[in-house]
Amino acid sequence: MEEKNVLQQLVSEKLSIERTPLLVSPHVEEHERLESQPSGSTIPRSPVGAVQHILDDQDLLWVEVQPLVDLERGSVAGYECLARCPKHWGIGPDALFAAATMLGVAGRLQRHIIHATLALRESAPCNTFLTLNVEPPDLLDDSVVATLLEYGDLRRVVVEVTERGWPERTDRLVEALDRLREAGALVALDDAGTGHSDLARLMALRPDIVKLDHKLVTDLDTEVATRSMVSMMGELCGRLDSWLLVEGIERIEQLRVLAQLRVPLGQGYLLGEPQPPWPQARVPLEQRIVLEEAALSECLVSLLQHPRDLARLGVSSGIGEMAMAPMTKLPDALRRALNRPEATRFSPIVVTDPRGKVVGEVVMDRLMLAALDLQQDQSSNSSI
C-alpha cells in the first residue's frame, strides 16, 4: 500500500497542471447558426440533394477537427480534419461523398475541403499536424493534386488515403503521392487491417502513418489475440519506418493496453470528439495517470519497496554513492549499480526524493529481471 501511495504521489505531482480553455474557430458561430435553423431553409431529402445544396452554397460544408493524441505525453500531436454539413440534414460525410462521386462532382467537394483545411494551418497550435482525408480516385484527379500543390509548402499536412475506390494498379496513385511528398506532405493509410490487400497497399504506399481501424481494437483489453495483432502491426510499422495510430479509443481499459504496448498515437472519443478548431490536450486526469504509469514502469519507482530497516540505509552504508532518483531509467540504474565497488555492487539501490529523503529501495535481482523484460519488450515493440 505504501509503495502504491509513493507512485500515486509522484504521478500527482507531475500532473499538477491547469487545464487550458477550449479555443474555437471564428466560424463556429456561423456553423451553430446553420445547425439551429432548419426553419426557413430547405432540408435535402437525400445525399444527392445535399450535394446539390452544397454546390449552390459551399458554406454548408465545413471542417471540424478531432485530436490525434501522443500517447506517451498525453498531448495533442495533430488533428484529423473532418468534413461536416448541417446535423439536421441527417446525412453523414460518407454518404455525402458517395453521392458526389455518383454525380461526378467529388473533386469539387474535395477541393473545397482542401482549401478549408489548409486555411487552418496558420492558426493551428505549434508542433501539430493536420490530416486530410482523400479517396484514391480523387488523388488520380489532376485538379485535386494541383489544388494541394498550389500551396507550395505542404509541411505539417498529412494526406490520409481512405479505403474506398482503390485502383487495381497503384502506379499513378503512388506517383501522385510522391509529388505531394516532394512538397513536404506526409502520407497516412486509413483503416489498415480491414481489407484483404492491406499488406500490398502498405508495401506500395510506404505510409508515414498507419491508422489501425477501430473495429480491430474493440476487445483489445480482453483478447490476447487482439493485443498480439496490435503488437505485430507495430513491429511491421517499425520496419516500414512508419508510426502506428490506433483509432476508436473509447474506454480507459483500451488506453491502458495501448500505453503498455508503447503505441505512439491514438484517436477516439475518450481522448476528444470532433469539434470546431482547436480542442486542446484535454486528457482527463484518470487517462493521464494511465499514460504516466506506463512511462513510470520503465523507471526505478516501479520497483520501489520499503526496506524492513530504514536505519541501515543511513550514511554509514554509503548512501551518497548508492542513492538514485525514483525516475531513473531501469537500464541506467542497472549500469550505475554494476559500476559500484565490488563490495556493494549487488546491494539494494537506495531511492531518495529531491530533498535526499529515503523513500525506499530496489533490490538488484528485481532490477536485473525488469531491465531484461524491458529490453525484450522494446525489441518486439520497437515500432510502436
Image: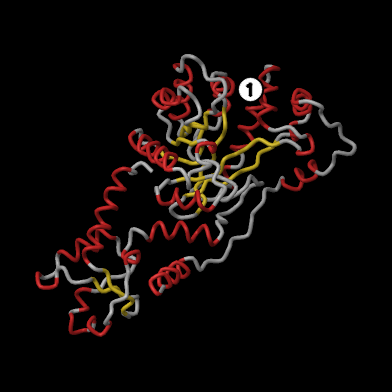
* Amino acid residing under circle 1: Gly
Which structural element holds mark 1? helix
Image x and y of residue 331, in percent: 25, 58
The residue furthest left is 342
Image x and y of residue 171, in percent: 44, 16
Residue under the point 28% across and 60% down? 330
Residue under label 1: 107
The structure's colour scheme is: secondary structure
Work out whether residue 97 or residue 326 is closer to the camera in this orientation and state it.
326
Work out whether residue 354 or residue 302 is closer to the camera in this orientation and state it.
302
Q: In this view, does 338 lie to the left or right of 110?
A: left
Image x and y of residue 75, in percent: 50, 54
Tell me if residue 189 comes above or below residue 331 in the rendering: above
Q: In this view, does 99 lie to the left or right of 195?
A: right
Quarter the C terminus occupies: top left
The residue furthest top is 168
Quarter the N terminus occupies: bottom left
Work out whether residue 335 or residue 297 is closer to the camera in this orientation and state it.
297
Q: Is residue 324 left or right of residue 164?
A: left
Structural crowding at the residue carrying mark 1, measured as other residues with C-alpha within 10 Å and reported as few (<14), some (14–19) or many (≥20): many
